[in-house]
Amino acid sequence: GCRENNRKEQLQWKKPCGSLVPGGVGSTVYVTRGEKNMHKGLLFDLDGVIVDTARYHYLAWKELAQELGIPFTREDNERLKGVSRNRSFEIILEIGNRQMEEAQKEYYCTRKNGIYLEYLQTLSEKDILPGVQEFLEAARAKGYRTALGSASKNAVFILEKLKLSESFDAVIDGNKVSKAKPDPEVFLNGAVALGLAGCDCIVFEDAAAGIKAAHAGGMRAVGIGKPEILSEADYVIRGFEKITIEEIEQEIM
Ligand code: BG6
Ligand code: MG
């Protein structure tokens, strides 16, 4: 079976690996596309993969941290990538060696989201990262099913602003999962929503926690960003600019 095959050398992806689950929960699979790759799925993280919102998350947390007198660097911020809003704040408190009542944590998380949403006000199609639209279109034309797998509770709102909602057959976001990456829940739910087994899916992630989540779900993982940070990924690309689905197929299938 393919379940435990995470490493490139062991990969075999010549045919579907598991039973299909047609019309899984939340699935809106389109049947009008090419049939060739209908048994394969691409699962995309949102922040830092589809759109450069990772920057705004950082700026919003930085503002709060400063207010609380907690030093917070870009390096610290790496630990927050892919992590839920509440957990992110707990990490910041840990960095500052501070403790806080639940109600007060709640207050700061709500404020952080307020600051973050202000940054998102002007968000539009122009903020989609280079090459993403082309990559999605080409993959879907080849028959791949696509899903979003994000920890963000703002994911649906962001996809609408980017006019990208139609590019995904399913959306699994922070409102639909209880366990944060590196737990594979978000991606496993994505695979189910596409009617696919985990091992028939490839995950695209900018966070180390997301790469771990993909592997824990028996999926291959393409890292988006710096190889030093994403050393566990099966393949790392800087972004989708000039990257073709054929290149990904060649590298990791
Ligand atoms: C992830 C980001 O996608 O979503 C994290 O990488 C963020 O940095 C998390 O904390 C939760 O996002 P939101 O929009 O629900 O606060
Ligand atoms: Mg991300």
Image (cartoon, helix red, strand yellow):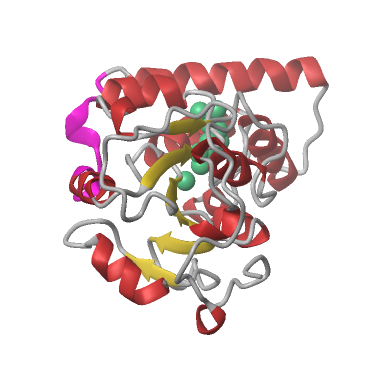
Q: Residue at 16% x, 61% y: name it.
A: 242
Residue 128 in view of the camera: yes
Magenta span contains residue 196: no
Q: Is residue 26 above or below residue 35?
A: above
- Give yes or no for residue 125 being in the magenta stretch: yes
Left or right placement of residue 102 versus residue 180 in this view:
right
Front in this rendered view, residue 65 or 22: 22
Image-quadrant location for residue 178: top right
Quadrant for the N terminus, please. bottom right
- Image quadrant occupied by the C terminus: bottom left
Total labels: the figure holds: 0
**Residue 148 location, quadrant:** top left
Q: Is residue 222 left or right of residue 70?
A: left
Q: In the image, residue 170 lies at what x, y percent? A: 46, 32
Asked whether residue 66 appears in the rendered view, the answer is no
Give the residues in magenta: 122-133
Question: Residue at coordinates 22% horizontally, 25% vertically from top-left?
Answer: 124
Is residue 242 depicted above or below 253 in this figure? above
Q: Please, is residue 4 above or below residue 200 in the view?
A: below
Residue drawn at (54%, 26%) of the image: 26
